[in-house]
Amino acid sequence: MKFIHPVCSIWRSIFLAFVVSAVGPTHATASLTAESAALSAQKNNPDLAAARNLIAEADARTRTAGRLANPEIEGELAGGQDLEGRISIGITQRFPLTARLRLERELSAIEVELARLEVRERERQIAVAARSAIYELAAVRESLALARQQTRAAEEFAKSLGEAMDQGFGSKLDGQQASLAASTLRITEDIFLAEELLAVGHLNRLLGLPADSPISLAETLELPKSAPTSRPVGVRPDLQLAELAIQAGATDLSLAKAARWDDIGVGLFVEGERFRDDPEGVEPEALLGIKFSVPLPFWQDGSGKVDEKQAVQNRKTQQLEALRLSMQNEILTAHRVMTLLHRAAARIDDTLVPAARDHVAETEAAYRRAELDIQSIFRSRERLAEIEAAALDARKKYFLSYSDWLGTLGLPSSP
């Protein structure tokens, strides 16, 4: 199991206070877990806020879908000699011969639901990204704490060698090597500090916070006793999106077939005319009539558009089947990878780390008994540092794979 010295928490608090004072005004946040970060990102991420306008856009389009075309007013004026002439005023309304308007309304309503599902899919992706960012930040901070712990141990060892050399024991070269090891670890701390700043900045972007907002974590990389058991897929918005796209495609295909016949026009007109009728002279006459027009699909019969929509429908159907197969493979693979990573991380924590620490203690005891040279201590300490870093990396990979597995299930939070 991992061990973090209590002093690490003090150093971490001091470091955060220094960063806060250095960068200026900050925005305080509550301690975050992977669950709360995922939910907060879904509520506050600026990209999601922009994406939600897709729903308003689609909803606005429904108010104009499936309506009759505006009526048309027509007029005509003609004149000749001796006040002869004709004036005509009429109004025409076009009506569909098919169920085109109803299909347009149905398609518009489906597009609103498609927009909602698209936003939910983006929410799912943001939740997975926020959860992974929490684990990344937790891993960096634990790496920083581990590096500080190792630095203190190396400095204490270098100090003890220096005291021994002052008393005439030990080698100057051994003391220099110990000092170099401690200095190297201090440089490693600076690298982890830089990585922490990057991880905090990335998480703040996902949460919709300013880059200088401090992040307090209530999440650790402590391994659970076992990996979660496998489970079937949850509610995946991308799958629902693909299924609804099939329905939209069918409606769009029907609409293309209905649109092969253009609208007919029906109108009323009033016409007044003055004409010369000898020997009576110029006489007026008024007419009231009905007119209509029926388009004939001779040159543009819409067959190409229908074939295009049919091909689109076939493509969407095949994409849906491909997505279902891909999801099944993703879920199965993600769970297997997560289980193997948990097993590996548990073995390192429970077996290798304790064994490496015991080996360091035994090596140091043997050195004090003059049974081993000091190089054996250096090698055992280096090996312990490698194993502790490997243990932390294995836990980090497990939690990231856990986040990926939840994402394949379509779950924003733990089951």
Image (cartoon, rainbow, N blue to C red):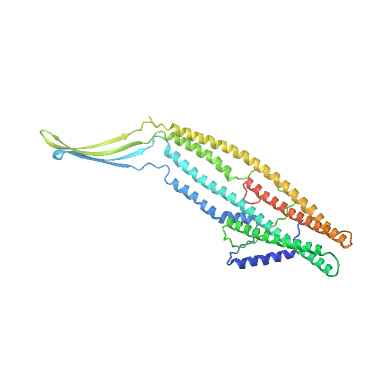
Q: Residue furthest bottom?
A: 167
User: Where residue 180 appears, x then y in whole percent?
Assistant: 75, 62
Quadrant of residue 366 in the image? bottom right
User: Where residue 86 appears, x then y in whole percent?
Assistant: 20, 38
- For residue 40, above or below residue 80: below
45 sits left or right of 232 in the view = left
Out of 94 and 388, give the one closest to the viewer.
Answer: 388
| Residue at x 33%, y 36% (from the top left corner) | 265
Image quadrant occupied by the N terminus: bottom right
User: Where residue 233 appears, x then y in whole percent?
Assistant: 64, 43
Q: Residue furthest top?
A: 298
Out of 140 and 335, give the one closest to the viewer.
Answer: 140
| Residue at x 54%, y 36% (from the top left corner) | 315
User: Where residue 18 appears, x then y in whole percent?
Assistant: 64, 67
Out of 21 and 337, give the one closest to the viewer.
Answer: 21
User: How many numbered marks have been drawn onto this rendered protein structure?
Assistant: 0
- For residue 270, above or below residue 51: above
Q: Residue furthest left?
A: 279
Quadrant of residue 7 in the image? bottom right
| Residue at x 60%, y 40% (from the top left corner) | 323
Out of 245 and 158, give the one closest to the viewer.
Answer: 158
